[in-house]
Image (tube, helix red, strand yellow):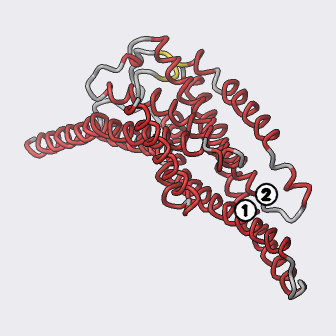
């Protein structure tokens, strides 16, 4: 009798500890991610919108992805921060629940598919086939952006029908109202938003590596076959090609690091959501329910980190290309502020 009571008390204490950790994560984690995410994505939009970068198709995809990332962080993290203080209206007001999740998951779809588009653009621009390289242009970029936005809106429309507030027995009070709705929306998110673009990013990433290898072989062959005497015009052309190639290499580094971190941060959240739908219903006061809630909250915050980290990735991996653009932006902003203060 005493042993069973002791075990029960230990379980209760463990559940309380796990729930306290979850509450601390919800109270503090979203605030940090929100600040760094908003600042980083806004800086990305300003930096990538500069003249030196906005004419590059991949930079435009990165910029639109950062814009969508702002919507992800605002729509997703404000409610998470309020949940930490038991003031999350999405859990109790039906229309807020529907709009919040539609905007959140549509924006997240745009983020991932824009990165995929940047990957495909890098594959096209690194190809030795001139016709494929010609497909990397601003006209196709605009078409691609429109198609992705329409796709994101269409596949996430079920959130308006399926999601309801004031639910019990689910990981969140704002969730799919029926079992079929939970399965449908979680599969849409896991497959249509996360898994398909991530798998295609890996595929096209490998194709880029193959293109780069072929291009290096071709360059070595051309250098060996070239004449020792070069004209001034050919030197200028060579310098121009070298500068363009350097930009492409730095963009490729930015892209590669972002794909890796997206896979690590976004993938677990999508898998967890599907598991929570297919898995058995657990009593809210059980140890397993507390553990699954903690894991769900950790993976959710990681997915938001993936939407707030691009600026810091680009600063780290973008080399002189991106850092110079950041410095130019700071100088331009400082000059404008000085002019305004003087006038």
- Residue 326 lies left or right of residue 13; in this view the side is right
Residue at the spot of label 1 = 244
Q: Nearer the viewer, residue 6 or 246?
A: 246
Badge 1 local density, few (<14 within 10 Å), some, or many (20+)? few
Q: Quadrant of the N terminus?
A: top left
Mark number for residue 280?
A: none
Q: Nearer the viewer, residue 119 or 196?
A: 119
Q: Is residue 19 above or below residue 204?
A: above
Query: Residue sitting at 50 percent across and 33 percent down?
Result: 70
- On the image, the x and y values in percent for residue 211 come to 79, 67
Work out which residue is located at the far left of the displayed protein and give it.
Answer: 2
Residue at the spot of label 2 = 125
Query: Residue sitting at 53 percent across and 37 percent down?
Result: 69
Q: Quadrant of residue 259?
A: bottom right
Q: Quadrant of residue 229?
A: bottom right
- On the image, the x and y values in percent for residue 37 come to 43, 40
């Amino acid at each position: 009798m005493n042993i069973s009571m002791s075990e029960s008390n230990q379980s209760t204490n463990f559940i309380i500890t796990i729930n306290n950790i979850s509450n601390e994560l919800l109270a503090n984690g979203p605030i940090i991610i929100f600040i760094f995410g908003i600042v980083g994505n806004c800086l990305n939009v300003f930096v990538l919108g500069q003249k030196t970068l906005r004419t590059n198709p991949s930079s435009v995809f990165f910029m639109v992805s950062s814009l969508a990332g702002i919507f992800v962080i605002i729509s997703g993290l404000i409610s998470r921060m309020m949940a930490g203080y038991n003031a999350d209206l999405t859990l109790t007001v039906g229309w807020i629940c529907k709009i919040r999740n539609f905007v959140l998951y549509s924006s997240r779809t745009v983020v991932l598919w824009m990165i995929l588009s940047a990957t495909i653009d890098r594959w096209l621009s690194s190809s030795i086939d001139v016709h494929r390289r010609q497909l990397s242009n601003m006209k196709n970029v605009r078409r691609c952006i429109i198609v992705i936005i329409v796709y994101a809106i269409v596949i996430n429309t079920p959130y308006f029908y399926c999601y309801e507030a004031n639910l019990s027995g689910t990981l969140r009070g704002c969730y799919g109202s029926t079992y079929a709705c939970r399965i449908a929306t979680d599969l849409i998110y896991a497959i249509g938003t996360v898994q398909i673009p991530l798998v295609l990013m890996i595929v096209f990433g490998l194709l880029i590596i193959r293109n780069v290898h072929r291009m290096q072989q071709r360059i070595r062959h051309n250098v060996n076959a070239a004449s020792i005497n070069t004209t001034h015009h050919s030197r200028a052309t060579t310098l121009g090609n070298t500068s363009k190639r350097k930009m492409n290499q730095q963009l490729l580094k930015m892209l590669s690091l972002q794909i890796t971190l997206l896979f690590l941060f976004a993938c677990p959240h999508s898998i967890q959501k599907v598991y929570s739908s297919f898995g058995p219903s657990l009593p809210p006061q059980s140890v397993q329910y507390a553990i699954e809630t903690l894991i769900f909250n950790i993976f959710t915050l990681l997915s938001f980190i993936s939407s707030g980290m691009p600026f810091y990735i680009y600063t780290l991996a973008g080399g002189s290309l991106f850092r110079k653009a950041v410095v130019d932006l700071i100088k331009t902003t400082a000059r404008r502020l000085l002019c305004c203060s003087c006038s």
